[in-house]
Amino acid sequence: MTKNLLVLTAVLEAATGIALLALPAVAIALLLGEKLESSGAMVVARVTGAAMLSLGLACWLARNDGQTRPGRGVITAMLVYNFVVAALFGYAGLVPGLTGIGLWPAAGAHTALAVWCVASLRSA
């Protein structure tokens, strides 16, 4: 269960990170339905992409260590990340104008991943 969680998380986070690095305007438009109009926003989106790519790499490298203390540390970090991102996306969905086609699916995916992290930590 833990290995599958870490592999899926690695793939999703790395893919999203690469999308934000390569095409930040498209990724943000799909997620929030907003345009990135300033160069500062482009830089922040790309920094976020680099962070997400790094999270994906950490999950990939820890995929066989889920039951060890460092592996549980990665899962705990991903629990916090997924919980906060799900809450932020849920809040964003309540703000008029933020209606990207990917917003609610992303919020749901992060909620599901957070629940999976809790279940994985409990089984350890």
Image (tube, rainbow, N blue to C red):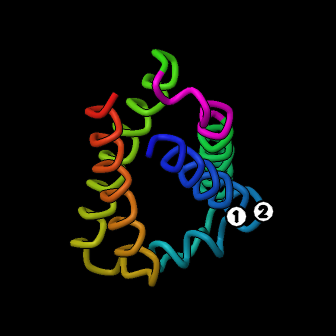
Image: magenta residue range: 58-67
Q: What amino acid type should be assigned to the residue bearing mark 1?
A: Ala
Q: Nearer the viewer, residue 90 or 118?
A: 118
- Answer yes or no: do the residues labelled 1 and 2 have beta carbons within 8 Å? yes
Q: Position of residue 50 (x, y in %)?
A: 68, 44
Mark 2 burial class by Cα count in 10 Å: few <14, some 14-19, many 20+: few
Left or right of residue 97, residue 102 in this image: right
Principal SS element in the magenta part? loop
> Residue 108, relative to residue 11: is it above or below?
below
* Residue 59 lies in the magenta-colored region: yes
Identify the residue at image location x=35%, y=42%. 117
Q: Position of residue 107 (x, y in %)?
A: 34, 65
The quadrant the C terminus occupies is top left
Mark 1 burial class by Cα count in 10 Å: few <14, some 14-19, many 20+: many
The residue labelled by disc 1 is 19
The residue labelled by disc 2 is 22
